[in-house]
Image (cartoon, rainbow, N blue to C red):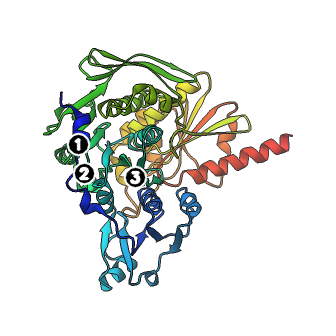
């Protein structure tokens, strides 16, 4: 085995190229995006001048920017002037008025991935890629390493932090439109490869090809989930360390015990026993995410007792199994928008609340994904005791399609009724149960409408 700790301490010859300009103001076009807001916070923490623009509508990423004192302007070409360096959000093309104005003025423009790559070059970088689980694993690794050594991070829930002279940089690497091929990290965790984003990828082989490109650009090592058949076929010039629950995994979790308090498990690296670990997290996927964090930390020679301590204090990331109690109901908010993610979220809910009825309220995200994965959505949603849907959430790139939520609902055996925002009353039929709101669009507005109904009903009953 390559001595990764020794390699990790070698000087990266590219680091000198990555010095940021402290004289300019970095202007983020689309600053409220999950990745963009994280990056804006990171640059702000590093002492750089940051501002940006976005829609007026409130988003869950906005609060962190406001607390940092980062000014957010409405989109307007008048925002653009000399002295700015533009960071262009992935959702915006060259026809956006602010981007056009920046070109006219001859300003320097960086895409979001290009700006992240500049940060990657500054320190020991660990990217987290995968069709699912990126944000949760990034948040977990950032939390664990931050408690042990100076660590900068970008998490896809809008959280970002920049630390001067950081030892580590932990960041989420998104495969959509091959954005992550801009990156040349030291390490990469690959959680899985699945078919998603059918508006861009032609099929699973196209997705695999994108991950192969990132693997070829990784400098020191890759950590991959061993039960993924595509990840097992990775070809790379650096070591690939597989983690999982099978005998052929280098890093292996065994003796897994899942309770209503979380999970415990033993970890082995080949025949070496690394210890027993406890996490206050739910679902099998969080055992695997933790195992990936343990594997990376081991190869960086971080003491395992410190890893155990930090794992115990992780509270999760935004919009991933976020819980609240209203009246007699438990309400869970989750970003799950792919069948695999829905299964993982419902599995976690079953673990924590084994004796309660589980009601799923799902907002399909984009017409193309709904069509391409219709049967898989129905299968995963049927793991709930009762299923409700909302209308399909469109995107900037896709405003309509030849499918509706009723089409998906007809394939669901556990319900499938489509809820409307002005009538969430069907959910009032459930008591002392768990309602899981899932989706990547604006599902939270349905959740809030339901919460208001519950609260008002509770007040009347009292």
Q: CA distance from mark 3 to mark 2?
A: 20 Å
Mark 2 falls on what kind of element? loop
- Residue carrying label 3: 403
Q: Residue at x 37, y 61 (%)?
A: 398
Q: Is residue 412 above or below residue 12?
A: above
| Residue positioned most to the right | 462
Observer-side mark, 3 or 1, equals 1
Q: In x, y percent, where is residue 39?
A: 41, 59
Q: Is residue 102 left or right of residue 315?
A: left
**In the rendered view, would you say 360 is above or below 385?**
below
Left of 71 or right of it: where is 92? left
Q: Residue 449: x, y in percent?
A: 66, 51
Residue 156 at x, y percent in the picture: 43, 50
- Mark 3 residue crowding within 10 angstroms, few (<14) / some (14–19) / many (20+): some
Residue 204 shows which numbered tag?
A: 1
Q: On residue 201, which mark appears?
A: 2
Q: Residue at x 39, y 28 (%)?
A: 303
Of the pair 271 and 389, the residue shown nearer to us: 271
**Label 3's element?**
loop
Horizontal and vertical percent position of residue 212 = 18, 44
In this rendering, would 224 be left or right of 422?
A: left
**Quadrant, the N terminus:** top left
Q: For residue 329, what is the image quadrant?
A: top right
Res 181 label? none
Spatial CA span between label 2 and label 1: 8 Å
363 left or right of 206 in image: right
How far apart in space, not on screen, are marks 3 and 1 (Cα)? 22 Å
**Residue 194, visible in the rendered structure:** no
Under tag 1, what secondary structure?
A: helix
Q: Residue at x 69, y 40 (%)?
A: 428
Residue in the foreground of this view, choosing between 409 and 108: 108
């Amino acid at each position: 085995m390559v001595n990764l700790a020794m390699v990790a301490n070698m000087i990266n010859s590219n680091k000198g190229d990555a010095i940021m300009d402290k004289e300019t103001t970095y202007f983020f076009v689309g600053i409220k995006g999950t990745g963009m807001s994280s990056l804006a916070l990171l640059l702000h923490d590093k002492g750089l001048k940051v501002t940006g623009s976005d829609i007026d509508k409130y988003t869950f990423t906005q609060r962190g920017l406001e607390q940092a004192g980062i000014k957010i302007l409405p989109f307007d070409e008048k925002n653009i002037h000399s002295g700015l360096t533009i960071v262009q959000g992935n959702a915006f093309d060259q026809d956006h008025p602010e981007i056009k104005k920046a070109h006219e003025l001859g300003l320097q423009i960086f895409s979001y991935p290009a700006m992240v790559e500049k940060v990657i070059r500054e320190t020991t970088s660990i990217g987290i890629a995968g069709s699912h689980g990126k944000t949760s694993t990034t948040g977990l690794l950032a939390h664990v390493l931050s408690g042990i050594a100076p660590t900068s991070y970008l998490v896809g829930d809008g959280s970002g932090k920049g630390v001067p002279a950081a030892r580590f940089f932990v960041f989420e690497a998104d495969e959509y439109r091959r954005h992550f091929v801009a990156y040349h990290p030291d390490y990469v965790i690959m959680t899985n490869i699945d078919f998603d984003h059918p508006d861009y990828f032609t099929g699973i082989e196209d997705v695999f090809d994108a991950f192969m490109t990132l693997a070829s650009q990784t400098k020191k090592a890759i950590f991959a989930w061993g039960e993924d058949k595509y990840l097992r076929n990775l070809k790379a010039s650096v070591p690939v360390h597989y983690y999982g629950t099978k005998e052929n995994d280098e890093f292996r979790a065994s003796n897994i015990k899942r309770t209503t308090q979380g999970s415990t498990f033993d970890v082995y690296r080949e025949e070496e026993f690394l210890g027993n670990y406890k996490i206050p997290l739910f679902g099998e996927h969080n055992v695997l995410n933790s195992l990936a964090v343990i594997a990376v930390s081991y190869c960086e020679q971080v003491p395992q007792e410190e890893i155990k301590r930090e794992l115990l204090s992780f509270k999760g990331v935004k919009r991933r199994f976020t819980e609240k109690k209203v009246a007699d109901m438990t309400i869970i908010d989750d970003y799950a928008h792919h069948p695999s993610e829905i299964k993982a979220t419902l599995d976690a809910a079953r673990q924590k609340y084994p004796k309660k009825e589980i009601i799923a309220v799902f907002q399909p995200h984009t017409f193309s994904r709904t069509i391409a994965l219709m049967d898989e959505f129905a299968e995963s949603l049927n793991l709930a005791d009762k299923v409700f849907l909302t209308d399909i959430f469109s995107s900037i790139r896709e405003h309509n399609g030849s499918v509706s939520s009723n089409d998906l609902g007809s394939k669901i055996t556990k319900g499938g009724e489509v809820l409307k925002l002005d009538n969430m009353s069907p959910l009032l039929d459930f008591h002392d149960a768990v309602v899981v709101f899932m989706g990547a669009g604006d599902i939270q507005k349905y959740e809030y409408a339901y919460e208001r109904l519950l609260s008002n009903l509770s007040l009347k009953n009292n």
